[in-house]
Image (cartoon, rainbow, N blue to C red):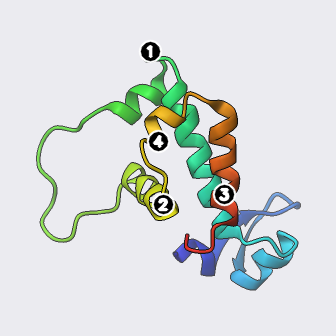
């Protein structure tokens, strides 16, 4: 959520500028930035799932880390957050749906339009 309120974006003058949420919304022509980002995350999840096993992003995505986590509240993991978004949308068995690109593209469009995300 911190991304929404304060963000460093690469400016046209090749300088980083501090932007607040209403400036981001003006730049995005009224589109909801959060919904767009969540849609892109779901799209990337589909791409990763279809990717060949020997590719580095796929290896990183499927790798299980060894050892124990630090004390305290566990940090949110990217995969868990995207899966939670899919649950909120009511998508079941997403691993099977990824194989059909057209169906997956429809799910991405639904995510960008979903009000609960």
Instruction: Please identify, in this view, whether the residue under mark 4 or under mark 1 is nearer the observer.
Output: 4
In percent of width and height, residue 9 lies at: 72, 64
Q: Characterize the local packing of mark 4: few (<14), some (14-19) or many (20 or more) Cα atoms within 10 angstroms.
A: some
Any mark on residue 94, and which? 4
- The CA span between labels 3 and 4 is 14 Å
Name the mark nearer the viewer: 1 or 3.
3
Residue 85 circle label:
2
Residue at numbered disc 1: 54
In space, the residues marked 1 and 3 are separated at their CA atoms by: 31 Å
> Could you give the CA–CA distance between mark 1 and mark 2, rounded to whole angstroms?
27 Å
**Circle 4: element type:** helix
* Left or right: 18, with 12 as reference point: left
Q: In this view, does 62 lie to the left or right of 17?
A: left
Query: In this rendering, is residue 18 above or below 51?
Result: below
Label 1 or label 2, whichever lies nearer to me, is 2
In this view, the mark in front (2 or 4): 4
The quarter of the picture where residue 36 lies is bottom right
- Distance Cα–Cα, label 4 vs label 1: 22 Å
How many badges with numbers are in the image?
4
Q: What residue appears at the point 47 percent right and 32 percent down from the top-left corner?
A: 96
């Amino acid at each position: 959520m911190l991304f929404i309120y304060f963000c460093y974006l690469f400016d046209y003058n090749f300088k980083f500028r501090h932007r607040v949420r209403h400036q981001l919304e003006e730049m995005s022509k009224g589109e909801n930035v959060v919904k767009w980002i969540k849609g892109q995350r779901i799209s990337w999840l589909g791409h990763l799932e279809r990717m060949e096993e020997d590719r580095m992003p796929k290896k990183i995505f499927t790798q299980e880390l060894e050892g124990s986590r630090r004390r305290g509240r566990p940090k949110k993991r990217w995969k868990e957050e995207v899966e939670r978004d899919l649950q909120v949308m009511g998508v079941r068995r997403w691993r099977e749906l990824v194989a059909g690109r057209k169906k997956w593209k429809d799910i991405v469009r639904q995510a960008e339009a979903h009000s609960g995300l």
